[in-house]
C-alpha cells in the first residue's frame, strides 16, 4: 500500500461531496481559510482507522489531504508537499 504524504497541521473545513453508494464518495468543493475552493482532482484516496482520506488538488497546484471522521461527522484539511 502506498504511503500517504505527511500532512502538516489539520484545520476544520466544510466539504461538499458527491455521494453515490456511500458518503463521502468524492469531494467536489470545500470552504477553507475563508474561501470556496473547487477540487480539480482527487489524486488518491485511502482508508485509515477512524477516517477516510483524500489527496486533492486545488487551483494553483495546491495539494491538500482531506480527512473525513465519520464518528464525529467532521472534515479536516492539511496542506502537504508533493507526493
Image: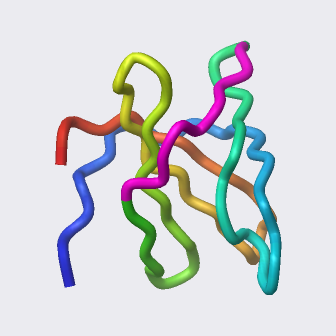
Q: What secondary structure characterizes most of the magenta part?
A: strand
Give x and y (percent) for residue 14.
77, 40
Looking at the image, residue 20 sits to the left or right of residue 24; the answer is: right
Asked if residue 78 is among those painted magenta in the image, a careful observer would answer no
Instruction: Tell me the residue at 73%/29% (across/down).
Output: 31
Q: Within the image, what quadrant is residue 25 found in?
A: bottom right
Looking at the image, residue 39 sits to the left or right of residue 36; the answer is: left
Q: Nearer the viewer, residue 47 or 59?
A: 59
Q: Which residues are magenta?
A: 35-43
Instruction: Tell me the residue at 66%/53% (across/down).
Output: 27
Give x and y (percent) for residue 35.
71, 15
Give x and y (percent) for residue 40.
53, 37
Give x and y (percent) for residue 72.
78, 67
Instruction: Tell me the residue at 55%/58% (across/down).
Output: 67
How is colour applied across the structure in the image?
rainbow
Asked if residue 41 is among those painted magenta in the image, a careful observer would answer yes
Amino acid at each position: 500500500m502506498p504511503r500517504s504524504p505527511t500532512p502538516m497541521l489539520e484545520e476544520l473545513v466544510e466539504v461538499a461531496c458527491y455521494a453515490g453508494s456511500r458518503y463521502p464518495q468524492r469531494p467536489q468543493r470545500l470552504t477553507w481559510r475563508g474561501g470556496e475552493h473547487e477540487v480539480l482532482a482527487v489524486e488518491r484516496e485511502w482508508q485509515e482507522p477512524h477516517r477516510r482520506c483524500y489527496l486533492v488538488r486545488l487551483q494553483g497546484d495546491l495539494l491538500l489531504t482531506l480527512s473525513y471522521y465519520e464518528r464525529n461527522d467532521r472534515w479536516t484539511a492539511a496542506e502537504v508537499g508533493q507526493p
